[in-house]
Amino acid sequence: MTISNYKKIRAEVLNYINQIAWQSPHAITLTLKQASANNGRIDEIKASDTLKHFCNRVNRSLLGRSAVRNGQRLPCFSVYEGTVDVRPHYHLCLDRPNDITYERFVAEIHTAWAATHFGYREIEVKPCTNVDGWLEYMTKRRTKTDFQSSIDWNNTTRVRS
């Protein structure tokens, strides 16, 4: 991919994601195990499935089963990174519900990530004071094998229904 194509695609992605009405966004980094005894080596498909499992658990624990059953999800933008030299990980911008304390939010993230097959112990959660800056960082070209496929659209949700 040429630099000009990357810049065009990145601008379109950021335009799309900036339409999210973030209430209390958090910058999250979730590190993946490189392999699991029962599930083999990590790849982008297994990583996406792991993040889906994580998102389902977080949404259910923070929004309740009835909300999830009715299609309610927390706004989330997710990007996968990993190379030969960089351990696979996800960067997320995830919205915290206003009625959930920061401490409970962080605890639920740790619990949900630990419950996945490929969740590694390195987790970082911070309130996002500069959403545009975090989104710019998430969409950087470095540490991605392919920029277009690094954005995990299966686990990206724009609005809380």
Image (cartoon, grey):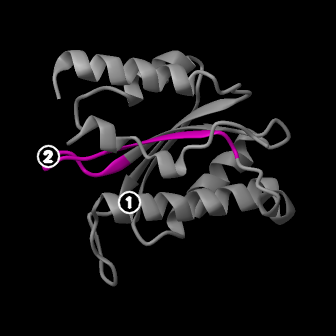
Q: What number is the disc on residue 7?
A: none
Residue at the far bottom in the pictured view: 38
Where disc 2 sits, the SS reads: loop
Q: Is residue 18 left or right of residue 48?
A: right
Q: Is residue 152 left or right of residue 21?
A: left
Question: Looking at the picture, how far across and down is residue 115, in whole percent?
Answer: 54, 70
Q: Is residue 80 magenta?
A: yes
Q: Is residue 158 above or below residue 121?
A: above
Highlighted range, magenta: 74-89
Categorize mark 2 by other alpha carbons within 10 Å: few (<14), some (14-19), many (20+).
few
Evaluate if marks 2 and 1 touch, with contact meaning CB atoms under 8 Å apart.
Answer: no
Q: Which residue is mark 1?
A: 47
Q: What number is the disc on residue 85?
A: 2
Q: How many marks?
A: 2
Q: Is residue 20 magenta?
A: no
Q: Nearer the viewer, mark 2 or mark 1?
A: 1
Q: Say which quadrant the N terminus sits in.
A: top left
Q: Say which quadrant the C terminus sits in.
A: top right
Residue 71, quarter of the rendered image: bottom right
